[in-house]
Amino acid sequence: MYEEILYEVADPVATITLNRPDKLNALTAQTMQEIRHAVANAEEREDVVGIVVTGAGRGFCAGLDMGILQAIQEAGDISAMASGGEVETAQPGVDSMRSEFGGGPFTYLFSVRKPIIAAVNGACAGLGFSLAMCCDLRFASASAVFTTVFAHRGLVAEHGMSWVLPRLIGSARALDILWSGRKFDGAEALRLGVANRVAAPESLLEEANAYVHDLAARCSPTSIMHMKQQVYNQLLQPLGEAMRETNRLQDESSKWPDLKEGVASFVERRPPNFNRIRAD
């Protein structure tokens, strides 16, 4: 059903692979719509605990397709990016978070109920860099190459990166990466905090999948969902408001069946059997 991505579900992992390898998986409007559609499907499926996003071939994503960038420049209007094929799609994400995180091409990923891992297997530039930063975690190949590239094109810190990047790595490091547009590899990405783990190219997907399998085996998907919502919502809140929300959730969680199962599995020295997240 997709033209520019591959989508596979193998319990507990949904894998979305950008599939324009001859273009280093440069993004078109069609690609972005297909990603959104696949994410919405994965969010609804009970057999999916986590989502892995990666690229086909030797690149993760080289950014926006140059043809679209030229159309934007000629039109003098960013809305030119939206032209292209249409894919009917549900709106992924938590209703209460959509208005806050719905403004960019990929910021909606913050409101998706399940963990999303970018498995950055190669070139990761521009809008592709933004896609990776809007995932919850980033596993980088040792051969990956990152660059924001915006300043090289006469652009600003686009797609929410002026908000996201300083929160990940601090303002000075963010400004260095944004201003210089310099390239850096997986090892430096790990040192900066851009990447959470670095793996050999041949084992990158295996490690990303193993992480989701470990979450599925040991952790409550309901807890994971609420923790994700807490972290991103509370980036926008003062401490007092954040603590009131946390205290309310603590009270609610004491009545959840997952607490009973978590305690029982510990006492009985067995793996837990937590409920999966179901479609609304």
Image (tube, rainbow, N blue to C red):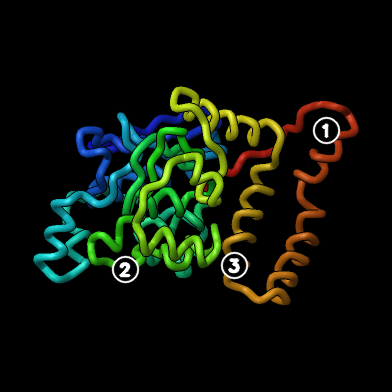
Residue visible at 76% across and 50% down in the picture: 256
Compared to residue 233, the image places residue 189 above or below, namely above
For this orientation, the residue located farthest to the right is: 267
3D distance between C-alphas at marks 1 and 2: 51 Å
Q: Which residue is drawn at 39% across and 54% down?
A: 130
- Residue bearing mark 3: 235
Q: Which residue lies furthest to the top in this view?
A: 202
Which picture quadrant has residue 212? Answer: top right
Q: Relative to 90, is 69 on the left or the right?
A: left
On the image, the x and y values in percent for residue 5 come to 30, 37
Read off the residue under disc 1: 265
At a point 32% along the width and 43% down the height, the residue shown is 61
Q: In this view, does 173 lie above or below 209?
A: below
Residue type pointed to by label 2: Val
Which structural element holds mark 1? helix
Tell me the kind of residue under disc 1.
Answer: Ser
Looking at the image, is mark 1 or mark 3 earlier in the sequence? 3
Describe the element under mark 3 as helix, strand or loop.
loop
User: Label 2: which residue?
Assistant: 156
Q: Do the residues labelled 2 and 3 touch (CB within 8 Å)?
A: no
Q: Contact, CB < 8 Å: mark 1 with mark 2?
A: no
Give the crowd class for mark 1: few <14, some 14-19, many >=20 residues within 10 Å. some
Tag nearer the camera, 1 or 2: 2
Tag nearer the camera, 1 or 3: 3
Nearer-the-camera pick, 131 or 248: 131
Residue 64: percent from left, percent from top: 25, 52
Residue 278, quarter of picture: top right
Amino acid at pointer 3: Leu
Which residue is at 66% across, 76% downward?
Answer: 238
Look at the image and tell me in which quarter the N terminus lies.
Answer: top left
Q: Nearer the viewer, residue 41 or 60?
A: 60
- Asked whether 23 or 226 is in front, the reply is 23
